[in-house]
Image (cartoon, rainbow, N blue to C red):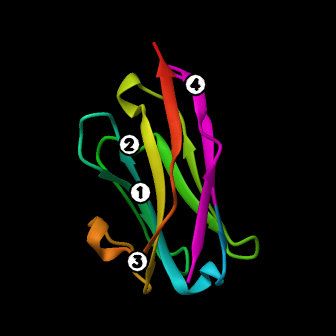
Amino acid sequence: QVQLVESGGGLVQAGGSLRLSCAASGRTLSGYAMAWFRQAPGKERQFVAAISRDWGTTSYADSVKDRFTISRDNAKNTVYLEMNSAKPEDAAVYYCAARMGASPRVAENEYDYWGQGTQVTVSS
């Protein structure tokens, strides 16, 4: 079992930056590809970014490409999402997810473990 706990959410001004963290316990994250998803009120959860097990491959949703950066520190068992140039449409609950396997995937049903989420609010 892998337990994931997100942190770092909060209020950010449009154009500002925020860094989300996802800390894992129970298992080392080095065996898992990781991803961030988000869900805004009244909308379905959507893919944001993913990173391969060895940090060699990343994947981003078009809506966040060139603004967000996913990274991981396997020594700290933590995954990060650096959010820059925040937009009001980025406001959502952000979830961290882990899948047993090397490659990042965009479909949420590919992921085995989920955190509880952290709220991000963007003020315009």
Image coordinates for residue 6, horizontal then vertical, percent: 60, 54
Q: Residues within 10 Å of mark 3 (few under 14, many from 20)?
A: few
Q: Quadrant of the C terminus?
A: top left
- Relative to 63, is 91 above or below? above
Which mark sits nearer the N-terminus, 1 or 4?
A: 4
Give the magenta part as a residue range: 1-22
- Determine whether the residue tagged by mark 2 lies in a helix, strand or loop: loop
Q: Residue at x 52, y 38 (%)?
A: 119
> What residue did someone put label 3 on?
112
Residue 41 relative to residue 4: left or right: left
Could you say which is closer to the camera, residue 28 or residue 114?
114
Could you give the CA–CA distance between mark 1 and mark 4, rounded to whole angstroms?
19 Å
Residue type indicated by callout 4: Val
Residue 16 showing in the rendered view? no
Tags 1 and 4 touching, CB below 8 Å: no
Residue type indicated by callout 3: Asp
> What residue did someone put label 4 on?
12
Image coordinates for residue 99, horizontal then vertical, percent: 43, 78
> What residue did someone put label 2 on?
64
**In the image, which is nearer the foreground, mark 4 or mark 2?**
4
> What residue did someone put label 1 on?
49
Residue 54 relative to residue 103: left or right: right
- Relative to 98, is 30 above or below? below
Q: Residue at x 57, y 78 (%)?
A: 2
- Determine whether the residue tagged by mark 1 lies in a helix, strand or loop: strand
Tags 1 and 2 touching, CB below 8 Å: yes
Q: Residue at x 75, y 76 (%)?
A: 75
- Determine whether the residue tagged by mark 4 lies in a helix, strand or loop: strand
